[in-house]
Amino acid sequence: MNGIHDLGGMHGMGPIAPPAQEPVFAHEWERRAFALFVPLFGAGCFNVDEFRHSIERMAPAEYLEGSYYEHWLHAFETLLCEKGYITAAELDARIAQMKGAN
Amino acid sequence: MAVTKDMVPVIVKTGASARVAEDVSASFKVGDKVRAKNFNPTTHTRLPRYIRGKVGTIIMDHGVFATPDAMAHGLGEHPQHLYNVVFTANELWGGNASKDTVSIDLWDDYLEKAGV
């Protein structure tokens, strides 16, 4: 699809300047997001192409503002809901529960 | 498939290959000039917009791989040849001053023979 992910040739995005000592994970939650991929993929919940496409389908503004692992989290939520492994209500309830815990 | 502890390092390190052990004939060979098709599917594709309609040269045939355009939509593997195709920066962006090139992996279906 001609989505926001297809940025090749676009101007005005600023220089690509990764820090010299870039950490593998910028936040602790990213470590957990990464770890989710293997069991979900391994259990056949989705394949890598479905995973990529779910990120491409993100709302463009959200995509541009989101970090790499935010994209991953979005993919997990989208695909697990679409494929019926969890419901949107279950996801919302869990988010509310975690917010309450903080 | 249940993921066991010993499988985790392998999956994390190498991922899962999309190579398919099936004998599929190749439409092109190394050295062929090819044009990337101009198509705009609303579904998943690995053919970026900036490559469409451009002419490049096949520099490697990786063999037979599952097609992401099909895999992303539950349409099976649709195995076909995957090639590494090199495009000059001048072909992609115009002008004639650059010596840069872009090498990109493209599936057989994405390509057509470039007219001479």
Image: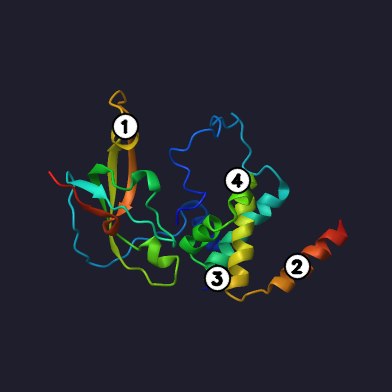
Residue kind at label 3, given as amino acid type? Cys
From the image, tell me which residue sits under label 1: B94
From the image, tell me which residue sits under label 3: A45
In the picture shown, does residue B112 fall above or below B23?
above
Mark 3 or mark 4, whichever is nearer to me:
4
Callouts 1 and 4 in the same chain? no
In the drawing, what numbered circle is on residue A102?
none
How crowded is the residue under tag 4: few (<14 C-alpha within 10 Å), some, or many (20+)?
Answer: few
Element on which disc 3 rests: loop
Element on which disc 4 rests: helix
Residue A35 visible somewhere in the drawing: no
Give the image location of residue A49, x and y in percent: 46, 61
Residue kind at label 2, given as amino acid type? Asp
Would you say A79 lies left or right of B82 here?
A: right
| C-alpha separation, residue under disc 3 versus residue under disc 2 | 20 Å
| Residues marked 1 and 4 touching at CB (< 8 Å) | no
Would you say A36 lies left or right of B78 here?
A: right
